[in-house]
Structure formats: C-alpha cells, structure tokens
Image: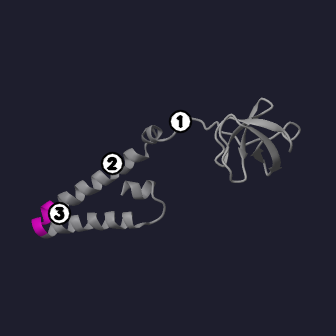
Amino acid sequence: MVLEILVIPGTSVGGIVALACLGIAIWQSFANYGMTAGLITLGVTLLVSFLALYFSLKSKTWKRLMLTEENTAKVNVIDEDIVKPGKQGLTISRLAPAGKVEIDGQEYEAHTFGEYVDPGQKVIVVKIEFNKIYVKSI
C-alpha cells in the first residue's frame, strides 16, 4: 500500500489488489474467528498501515534512498571558430558510429555516417549540424 501511495502514480492494479487483500483478510478474520479476533485484526491492520505510511513519509527515510551526487555531464558545446568543416582530429575512442575525438586539444563527441573508426585514427570534420560533429576517416 505504501508503494502505491508514494511511488506508483495514480490508482493502479497494485493498490487495488493490496486494498482487496487487506479487506478480505479482515473479513475472513471476522467470519472465521469471531468479533474479538476481527476487531483485533482490524486494529492491528490500521495501526501497521498508519505507522508504515508515517515512517515512509519521514524525510530521513527518503534521504537514504535519494541520489546525492551531482550530474556533471554536459552537452557537446562546439566553438564554431575552432571546429569547422575541413578541420582534422584524432579519435580517442572507437567511433561506432559515435565516440570521442580530439580536435585542437579539445575533446568532442563525434559521429560518422555509419562506418566504424578505431581509436588513434585521423579523422576530418565533414559537417556540423545541431551541435553534432560529423567526421570521416582520412
């Protein structure tokens, strides 16, 4: 039930099944063991449900589960004065068909037109389109 309330968005099959199971368990307790056992089952079920919800809503619980590292990745920012069609570079990683190239001491992500280029190969910039560098091997 806690997962349904906090994690799974909307009303889904998991919440409906969990609620049905709780209802059936309480009903069976009344039907098979009498009024006293049924009331005890109902009370314990409500108490455990509220405690589970309370402890799951505490901030320390979620701080243990959430990510604390900062994402330092960046978009391929291309200085068009440095990287132009016709400029030569060297592959750092395998271009299959995308990978890393070094052009004038700077590292960039580059794409080929479908071919594979091994690391350490010379490439030439063919075109730049929407911050994507397209290269071919020399």
Viewed as shown, does residue 107 lie left or right of 37? Answer: right
SS state under label 2: helix
Disc assigned to residue 38 = 3
Q: Secondary structure at mark 1?
A: loop
Q: Is residue 31 magenta?
A: no
Q: Amino acid at mark 2?
A: Leu
Q: Nearer the viewer, mark 1 or mark 3?
A: 1
Q: CA distance from mark 1 to mark 3?
A: 45 Å
* Residue identified by numbered label 1: 68
Q: Which mark is first along the chain, 3 or 2?
A: 3
Dot 1 and dot 3 residues touching (CB under 8 Å): no
Secondary structure type for disc 3: helix
Q: CA distance from mark 1 to mark 2?
A: 27 Å
Residue 97, position as x, y percentages in the image: 66, 49
Please tell me which residue lies in front, 106 or 54.
Answer: 106
Going by the numbered disc 3, the residue's amino acid type is Gly
Asked whether 97 or 71 is in front, the reply is 97
The residue lying at 66 percent from left, 36 percent from top is: 119
Overall secondary structure of the magenta section: helix
What residue is shown with label 2? Answer: 51
